[in-house]
Image (tube, helix red, strand yellow):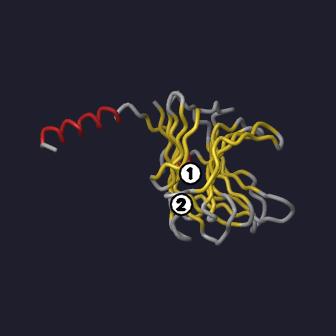
């Protein structure tokens, strides 16, 4: 590639990316994060050391913990990305949710140390619709206590799901139920979140 061509390519990339607007960033972890379902010393969602820390305990059936973010209106195209670290061994799902209506409907994208992922829409009660599910394939989860980046990219008619920069699935776009989003963990485990990014255009 010639120098001129390289400069043109960089210029096009910059122009293409400049119309994204960041509405949530790392600095908003405290100001726009809200504790939700904090209960006991063994089951909680709270701030600690500038990070969001979620711990769940599986007792009777599946227990899930949330960290709920302030209302974030999503445009026709958006990116939601988080850095999530699993700090205790577990094969249960952990990840993020978005499009939450404040009651019981939401969309979710979660992964597990079993090298599986799932994207789904929870439509009320125990009803849900699978958007995509399967093995992570070439997308490798990092070892325990190292951060994994989960990312959702929404275009006009597609949802793309990525783990540590590698695409794991793509499906037709799903209409969100609301404009809240956050972190979701299942079963018996503990995770930390130290970075979050939401962009729209």
| CA gap, disc 1 and disc 2 | 8 Å
Residue 130 occupies quadrant: top right
Using a 10 Å C-alpha cutoff, classify the residue at mark 1 as few (fewer than 14 neighbours), some (14 to 19) or many (20 or more). Answer: some
Coordinates of residue 191 in the picture (x, y in percent):
62, 63
Name the one closer to the observer, 38 or 79: 79
Coordinates of residue 139 in the picture (x, y in percent):
50, 57
SS at circle 1: helix
The vertical placement of 6 against 35, above or below, is above
Tag shown at residue 50: 2
Tell me the quadrant of the picture where the C terminus can be found.
top left
The vertical placement of 60 against 99, above or below, is below
Name the one closer to the observer, 71 or 131: 131
Q: How many marks?
A: 2
Q: Residue at x 75, y 68 (%)?
A: 42
Q: Residue furthest right?
A: 60
Using a 10 Å C-alpha cutoff, classify the residue at mark 2 as few (fewer than 14 neighbours), some (14 to 19) or many (20 or more). Answer: few
SS at circle 2: loop
In the rendered structure, the answer to whether residue 176 lies left or right of residue 128 reads left
The vertical placement of 31 against 41, above or below, is above
Tag shown at residue 30: 1
In the rendered structure, the answer to whether residue 64 lies left or right of residue 54 reads right
Q: Residue at x 56, y 51 (%)?
A: 30
């Amino acid at each position: 590639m010639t120098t001129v061509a390289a400069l043109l390519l960089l210029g096009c990339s910059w122009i293409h990316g400049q119309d994204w607007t960041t509405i949530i960033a790392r600095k908003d972890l405290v100001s726009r994060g809200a504790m939700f379902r904090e209960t006991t010393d063994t089951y909680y969602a709270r701030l600690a050391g500038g990070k969001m820390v979620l711990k769940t305990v599986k007792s009777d059936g599946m227990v899930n913990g949330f960290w709920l973010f302030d209302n974030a209106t999503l445009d026709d195209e958006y990116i939601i990305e988080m850095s999530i670290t699993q700090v205790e061994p577990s094969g249960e799902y952990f990840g993020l949710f978005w499009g939450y209506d404040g009651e019981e409907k939401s969309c979710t994208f979660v992964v597990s140390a079993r090298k599986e992922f799932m994207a789904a829409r929870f439509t009320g009660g125990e009803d849900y619709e699978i958007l995509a599910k399967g093995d992570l394939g070439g997308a490798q989860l990092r070892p325990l206590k190292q951060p994994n980046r989960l990312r959702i990219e929404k275009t006009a008619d597609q949802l793309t799901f990525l783990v540590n920069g590698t695409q794991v699935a793509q499906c037709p776009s799903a209409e969100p139920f609301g404009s809240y989003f956050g972190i979701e963990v299942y079963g018996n485990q503990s995770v930390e979140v130290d970075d979050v990014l939401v962009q729209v255009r």
